[in-house]
Image (tube, grey):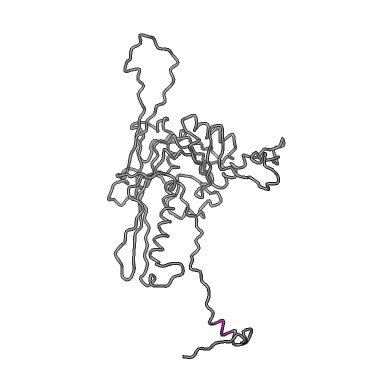
Amino acid sequence: MVFTTFESGGEWSGGSQVAGRDKTRRELLLEQIAYNSPTETPLLSILPKVSVDSIMPEWTMGDIERTPDIDGDSESQDFSSSSFSGENRTRAGNYTHIKTRFVEISDTQRMMNEVGVQDEYSHQIWREMLGLAIDFEYRLNFSTASFGTNATPGTSDIRTMHGIWSWAQSTGKSTNTVTIAGHQLEVGTAAAPADYRSTWYEPATVTTLTRDLLYDEVLEPFWARGGEVDKSICFVGAGIKRTLSGFSQVYNAAGTEPVHKLNELGIAASAKELFDTIDVYHSDCGTLHVSKNRYYNDVLTGSGAWYSSYGEGPISNFSPHKGMLIFEPRYMAIGVLEGMHVVPLAKTGLTTRALLGAQLTFICRNPKAIAAAYNVA
């Protein structure tokens, strides 16, 4: 075996030695794979998880509202059963929603020396688990419920949950819909009792969101019917978020260029900072926490939107760029019949396979804790 050593005085600047050196140089390949995909799941992350043991968990809503009695009572008045107004209790429920993903990796692929991956099988399980979480995030927002025999265990029919937007729409005070999550709120009634309806605003055509509209049609009705804005979260897309941030502008008499922004008052010019956003909106109805949500993003609308590739469509005629959702998380939960898990499958030839799955549902303990505006931009 012969070893050749080039001394420090050798000709490294040209000729065949340079060409030979190029062929023996080691390249530098970083042991990393750079992913830059949206993976946040705000609704799935912030809502508490509760265990359920039925494909259709149910719960009961109660109401303590009553019309105030301005008349006085006499000293000798006695109690009678007719004077008790009772309580308009009702029951609601939701179906559990199954989602699965599949991984299949050849044994040859697992033996390869992959960049940034120690084991392709484990890596793909990690990747598909993130995708499964995104699937559920989309369905917790927009999924519509199935009905009747579709919920029969052991059949080939598919159960789907009522997502939060479907709860807002189907129980909206102006929509007069009979059912919530596949069955009547009250047997024999023509619509969900007004005591349990969401605050739903939907103009006939796309309407610009203004400060007055937000108060008159969303926040004030929500507050008047028992909603607590201080304890609520607001999800919007980027476009409506910019509109809300624009509420900080004070316009001159001509109504054109802003003289200044309210949240710039008192800030020294030397700070050289421009505040052009509202994340916490202090309204007369309470303090609203505003969060920009990719699933509602008006930049990614139509068939090219990244969320539309996950199959099931959103609620009827819903366009994310037209939606604004306000809800109290304390009235919401995620029911877990079967948590996210991995089931190793039998090998097929020289391949390793696995099934990823979960069975969850959205629990809305009272739709009055939701306020939504659709068709605003």
**In the visual, does 38 lie left or right of 85?**
right
Picture quadrant of residue 333: top left
Q: Nearer the viewer, residue 237 or 202?
A: 237
**Does the magenta run of residues contain 235?**
no
Identify whether 227 is placed above or below 127.
Answer: above
- Span of residues in magenta: 19-23
Q: Position of residue 68 (x, y in %)?
A: 44, 20
Q: Identify the image quadrant of the C terminus.
A: top right
**In the visual, does 99 lie left or right of 273?**
left
Identify whether 91 is placed above or below 127.
Answer: above
Q: Which residue occupies 33% across, 17% down? A: 82
Identify whether 42 is placed above or below 3.
Answer: above
Q: Nearer the viewer, residue 376 or 351?
A: 351
Q: How many marks?
A: 0
Picture quadrant of residue 111: bottom left
Q: Position of residue 205 (x, y in %)?
A: 55, 40
Q: Which residue occupies 63% across, 45% down? A: 275
Picture quadrant of residue 147: top left
Predominant SS along the magenta part: helix
Q: Residue furthest toward the bottom?
A: 2
**In the visual, does 270 lie left or right of 54?**
right
Q: Position of residue 358 (x, y in %)?
A: 35, 52
Q: Position of residue 173 (x, y in %)?
A: 46, 33
**Does the magenta run of residues contain 20?**
yes
Q: Residue furthest toward the left?
A: 154
Q: Which residue occupies 41% across, 67% down? A: 118
